[in-house]
Image (cartoon, rainbow, N blue to C red):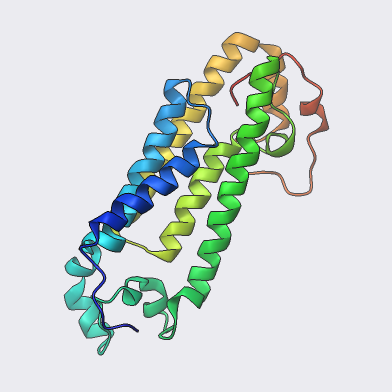
């Protein structure tokens, strides 16, 4: 691992945070409070992540005593050692090619793909004033929230910190609450069409091997998800 410290780089904190937040926002039509809240929760996670990745490694500072005892000879103030899962599970070579980092990349890419495809379908449904029931919406009712969770979990595998680990379940809870609020509004506005869709399609976790043809037949449903 490199012995060169890689912290205090606040310009990289700002640049990386802006890039990922703007990239995520480019898939979202920010019109409602729920849209802004979902992006805001994700943005808070991203800023906390890159603050420790390039700014100040709070987790390594707080755990430095334990890390030093358990993993002697590792320079935890080098950037490579900040990939804690790779270090703790013995991947001491190039952490960017370690199993956790590779899994992280797959999840992050998959999450952004799901986010893009979900909002594309939702935008078309909003424009036509109908249910979003094709693509990811044929499998789950809130694929965009699934996407945010998958992306955040991918980043946790790549660079786990105490702050982001604490934030993760709170943000998942926020997304669950936002989803339920959207469903309540949709039920009031669209009635039985929404109820039929909700019966056919699970909220977050898809039913493997089962299609949702019944959901796709409704035309008068929510323009939210």
Q: Which residue is depicted at the point 68% across and 31% down? A: 121
Q: Which residue is depicted at the point 21% across and 61% down? A: 56
187 or 146: nearer the eye?
146
Q: On the rendered image, what quadrant is the N terminus found in? A: bottom left
Residue 3 visible to the viewer: yes
Tell me if 156 is positioned left or right of 73 in this view.
right
**Vertical relation: 223 (above or below) 3:** above
Residue found at the very far bottom of the displayed protein: 73
Q: On the rendered image, what quadrant is the C terminus found in? A: top right
Residue 163: % across, % down:
28, 54
Q: Which residue is depicted at the point 64% across and 19% down? A: 126
Tell me if 145 is positioned left or right of 42 in this view.
right
Quarter of the image holding residue 75? bottom left
Quarter of the image holding residue 223? top right
Residue 27: % across, % down:
55, 36
109 or 174: nearer the eye?
109
Q: Which residue is depicted at the point 26% across and 90% down? A: 73
């Amino acid at each position: 691992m490199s012995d060169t410290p890689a912290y205090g780089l606040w310009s990289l904190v700002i640049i990386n945070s802006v890039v990922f937040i703007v990239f995520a926002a480019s898939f979202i039509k920010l019109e409602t409070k729920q849209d802004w809240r979902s992006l805001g929760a994700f943005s808070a996670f991203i800023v906390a992540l890159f603050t420790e990745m390039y700014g100040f490694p709070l987790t390594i500072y707080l755990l430095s005593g334990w890390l030093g005892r358990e993993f002697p000879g590792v320079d935890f103030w080098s950037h490579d050692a900040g990939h804690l899962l790779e270090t703790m599970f013995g991947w001491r070579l190039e952490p960017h090619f370690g199993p956790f980092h590779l899994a992280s990349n797959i999840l992050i890419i998959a999450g952004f793909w799901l986010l893009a495809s979900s909002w594309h379908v939702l935008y078309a449904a909003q424009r036509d004033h109908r249910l979003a029931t094709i693509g990811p919406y044929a499998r789950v009712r809130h694929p965009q929230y699934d996407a945010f969770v998958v992306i955040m979990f991918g980043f946790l595998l790549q660079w786990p910190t105490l702050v982001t680990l604490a934030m993760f379940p709170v943000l998942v809870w926020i997304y669950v609450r936002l989803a339920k609020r959207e469903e309540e509004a949709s039920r009031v506005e669209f009635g039985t069409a929404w109820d039929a869709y909700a019966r056919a399609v699970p909220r977050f976790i898809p039913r493997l091997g089962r299609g949702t043809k019944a959901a796709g037949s409704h035309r008068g449903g929510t323009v939210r998800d």
